Image: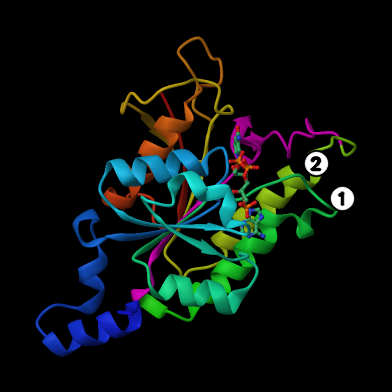
Amino acid sequence: MLTRRILLMLLGLGACIPASAAFAGEAAVDRVLIFGASGRIGRHIVDEALHRGYTVTGVSRDPSRLEDYADRIQVVTADILDRERVAELVDASDAVIVAIGGVPRSQDPAQYIAATAAESLIEVLQTFGDTGPRLIFVGSLFTLKFEDGKSLLELGRVPQDHENYAMFHGHQIALDRFRATDDVNWTVASPPNGLRLEGRTGKVRWGDDTLLRDPDGTPSGISREDFAFAIFEELAAGNYIRKRFNVAR
Ligand SMILES: NC(=O)c1ccc[n+]([C@@H]2O[C@H](COP(=O)([O-])OP(=O)(O)OC[C@H]3O[C@@H](n4cnc5c(N)ncnc54)[C@H](OP(=O)(O)O)[C@@H]3O)[C@@H](O)[C@H]2O)c1
């Protein structure tokens, strides 16, 4: 298999272009690795990647969940916390997109999968150095600035006994961990107000850390299809490297 490390070495031998430049834009990205490919958001990310002609590897802990994609993508089995396996898959990829989630198994936010996965991915991607692939990680709206420059978490609008308390705080831990990392090409993508709309329009508005709102002040929405569209627009544009964005219709 032509791994990323071997490819970069060969490009390096070609000399005139810096190896990292070969992976800077969408045209150079071909192989996209998608964690959470079987999930509600991940399936739309897979669809958008296929629509754009990428070569897709979809990850699941149970590949039967991706049976319906088997003739269109490479389906692989992996747990995102298995660093050795993740490194192997990353090495065969030009970009990594992560939309993992699930019901918290513990009340401890540090144990929520978003937090533990962020740690695993950062540790793996750090081993690739400056030429490592870009990572786009799906985050949570609860970490966006909602009012007075504060998130719903900071405003205390998520009670501790909320069933998803660990999930929302786990996402905050993940975001903080990414923000403390300057040697990985990470991006966190937060939907603004859930994913309540439907359909792909290909027309989106972009924001950074502050929740996007409609003209009447209502928190904006987006469809899963347009959210996936935005992820690939950002992959091509590179406007939010080591930043978080939110995006709305
Ligand atoms: N749905 C929404 O409206 C919404 C809104 C805002 C933010 N988000 C965030 O977006 C993310 C994805 O949400 P979703 O609704 O699409 O999730 P979902 O439908 O529950 O899917 C979760 C995905 O995570 C994967 N996964 C879980 N643990 C894993 C592990 N240890 N290793 C590898 N893969 C693992 C699962 O893969 P397998 O089970 O196949 O292995 C599955 O594909 C979550 O972090 C969520 O908080 C969701």
Residue denoted by label 2: 165
- Magenta-drawn stretch contains 156: yes
> Where on the picture, by quarter, is residue 1?
bottom left
Residue range of the region highlighted in magenta in the rendering: 131-159
Residue at x-position 18% and y-position 82%:
11
User: Does the residue at mark 2 contact the one at mark 1 (Cβ under 8 Å)?
Assistant: yes
User: Which x, y percent locates residue 140?
Assistant: 61, 41
Is 134 placed above or below 166 here?
A: below
CA distance separating discs 2 and 1: 8 Å
Residue 37 visible in this rendered orientation of the protein? no
Residue at x-position 66% and y-position 37%:
142
Label 2 Cα crowd, 10 Å radius (few <14 / some 14-19 / many 20+) = some
Residue denoted by label 1: 107
SS at mark 1 in the image? loop
User: Which x, y percent locates residue 180?
Assistant: 57, 65
User: Which x, y percent locates residue 79?
Assistant: 63, 65
User: Which x, y percent locates residue 56?
Assistant: 37, 56
SS at mark 2 in the image? helix
Q: What count of labels does the image hold?
A: 2
